[in-house]
Amino acid sequence: MELIVTLIAPGELSQGAVAAARDALAAAGGEPQAPVVTDPGRAVDLPVSGLGPRAARQAVEQVAEGFDAVVQPNAAERVKRLLVADMDSTIIGQECLDELADYAGRKAEIAAITERAMQGELDFAEALEARVAALAGLEESAIARTLAERVRLNPGARTLVGTMRAHGCRTVLVSGGFTAFTQAVAAQAGFDRQVANLLHVEGGRLAGTVGHPIVDSAAKKAVLEAERRALGLAPLQTLAVGDGANDIPMLEAAGLGIAFRAKPRAAAAADAAIRLGDLSAILHAQGIPRSRWVQG
């Protein structure tokens, strides 16, 4: 199997870094070819044979200082036709429920539960219901305040989504959070569709309950697979991006699963981990030159 190892730097990708990656691949038993510069000073493709994806990733990540590496099969069509993305701490930089809890004076308590759930230490659905129950009675207006005062797209989000759509890709935002947030974020980033949970409100205040069935890890994977089938795509033509343990099934089901500034379990399960770059690094991973990006 021939692989493409894409090196992506948020700053300057030095010749020394490229040489170190080539040497690491060769030392692991691979046969790296000459580098192909896809974005001068920022991104380089290294074709390599003789190694499996995991072995190549492990070799390069051991020397990855100042750059990210994405390893994937060398396919004729690298640009994916379906993008399914998590929202909290992926497309946006915040955890919406944690920020909402701040208006109830319970952010530290709720954030601690969120962190454990994202690390995979707690059942996601149970943790979600416990956090929502703790906010019962909070004024509904806190949702609008959270959106206006706290929620911000991560750098590169609009560029990623806009460019993917311009290249014929369907884009779906799927979240274990709430439609009260995903509807706004999907519109800001330019997604075709959004899927999330329904947060119950009664008399202008949070009821402390959430609609069922809950959008959990299985539901995220199901969304990806249903969208793929509806489009008639092969698994290799799909891309998923997320950061937490509840994203793992969809990351594993996608043709290219990318963990974005992720928790350790998600980073290990994904095909690649973006640790340093912004979301536009995912465009470099698909070989899309900057001249064909839709700047957000």
Image (cartoon, helix red, strand yellow):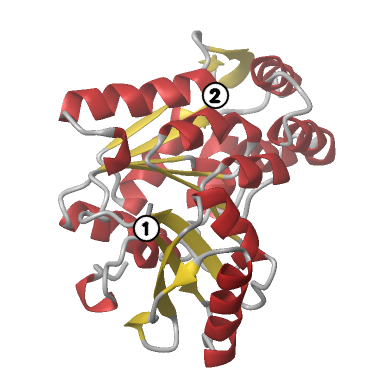
Q: Residue at x 17, y 57 (%)?
A: 166
- Kindly indicate the quadrant of the structure image that contains residue 223: top left
Mark 1, other Cα within 10 Å: few <14 / some 14–19 / many ≥20: some
Q: Residue at x 21, y 47 (%)?
A: 169
Please determine whether, in this image, residue 161 is positioned above or below residue 237: below
Q: Residue at x 84, y 34 (%)?
A: 109
Which amino acid type is shown beneath numbered disc 1?
Answer: Glu
- Kindly indicate the quadrant of the structure image that contains residue 273: bottom right
What percent of the width, then of the height, locates residue 241?
A: 47, 45
For the C terminus, the image quarter is bottom left
Label 1 residue SS: loop
Q: Which residue is mark 1?
A: 2
- Could you tell whether 246 is left or right of 103 in the image? left
Q: Residue at x 60, y 67 (%)?
A: 60
Which amino acid type is shown beneath numbered disc 2?
Answer: Ser
Please determine whether, in this image, residue 123 is positioned above or below residue 141: above
Marks 2 and 1 close (CB-CB < 8 Å): no
Q: How many marks?
A: 2
Which residue reaches farthest top? 212
Label 2 residue SS: helix
What percent of the width, then of the height, locates residue 289?
A: 26, 74
What percent of the width, then of the height, locates residue 209?
A: 61, 12
Mark 2, other Cα within 10 Å: few <14 / some 14–19 / many ≥20: some
Question: Along the line of sight, which residue is nearer the eye, 87 or 13?
Answer: 13
Q: Which residue is mark 2?
A: 217
Q: Is residue 90 visible?
A: yes
Of circles 2 and 1, the one toward us is 1
Which labelled disc corresponds to residue 41? none
- Could you tell whether 243 is left or right of 157 in the image? right
What percent of the width, then of the height, locates residue 181?
A: 47, 37
